[in-house]
Image: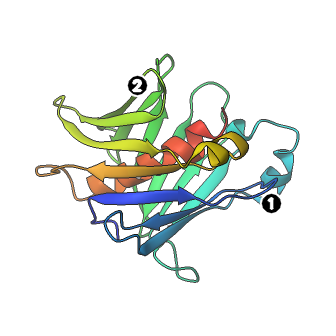
Amino acid sequence: MLERNSFFVKERVGLLKLVDTYDILDPATGQPIGIAKEEPPVWAKWLRLVIQKSMMPTTVNIYEQEGQPPVASIHRGFTLIRSKVRVVAGGQPLGYFQSKLISIGGGFNVFDNQNQQVAEVKGNWKGWDFKFISKQGREIGSVTKKWAGLGKELFTSADNYIISLKDLSGASPAAGALLLAAGLAIDVVYKEGE
């Protein structure tokens, strides 16, 4: 699953939900290829009722199928000003994301496990179209919100979006997994608190 170049991510709608679940689909066929589940510690889940969700620690596990071990995980600790989100795949740390202190439209930097910046995620002024930019300034992917219709947009916070990765030649083998995790982190870790 982590070797793919495009993903359709569909947030499940829920009433008064404390955690988020996302279906990961093949954008060409609509067939399920995975699921991402937010699985924070129990105490953090209940504290979300009184403390802003974006400040609380959380873990998002990415599964190919429910009941199997996760293929990748996104971990965020307590956050006050700048979020740091760690990415693990197959039990090995891949890297992390560090939010920018000041950014119009949102964005964060993507680092590999050796603390080397491999990409930057930049949002537009509306804050829902993002581009993955390599260290060399080349666009290597994007996240684009897919509008679900007026009723769903007005009455739920559930989002649908496409994560597309372009040619990653010359990039490390972990780059694709890091960029998929970055696409999920935009919504799960950074956007849900707004």
Q: Are marks 1 and 2 in contact (CB under 8 Å)?
A: no
Q: Residue at x 56, y 48 (%)?
A: 159
Residue 15, image quadrant? bottom right
Up the image or down, 167 lies above or below 103; here it is below
The residue carrying mark 2 is: 124
Quick one: SS at disc 2? loop
Q: Residue at x 81, y 45 (%)?
A: 48
- Residue 109 in view: no
Rendered image: mark on residue 95: none
Residue 32, image quadrant? bottom left
Q: Residues within 10 Å of mark 1 (few under 14, many from 20)?
A: few
On the image, the x and y values in percent for residue 58 come to 66, 51
Give the side of residue 169 with respect to residue 41, left or right: left
Q: Residues within 10 Å of mark 2 (few under 14, many from 20)?
A: some
Up the image or down, 9 lies above or below 65; here it is above
Q: Residue at x 31, y 58 (%)?
A: 6
Q: Earlier in the sequence, mark 1 or mark 2?
A: 1
- Which of discs 1 and 2 lies nearer the camera? The answer is 2
Q: Residue at x 63, y 50 (%)?
A: 158
Up the image or down, 107 lies above or below 68; here it is above
Rendered image: mark on residue 42: 1
User: The N terminus is located in which quarter?
Assistant: bottom left
Between residue 54 and residue 127, name the one nearer to us: 127
Instruction: Tell me the kind of residue under disc 2.
Output: Asn
Quick one: SS at disc 1? helix
Between residue 87 and residue 182, name the one nearer to us: 182
On the image, the x and y values in percent for residue 162 come to 39, 51
Marks 1/2: CA–CA distance: 35 Å
- Residue 167 in view: yes
Instruction: Tell me the kind of residue under disc 1.
Output: Val
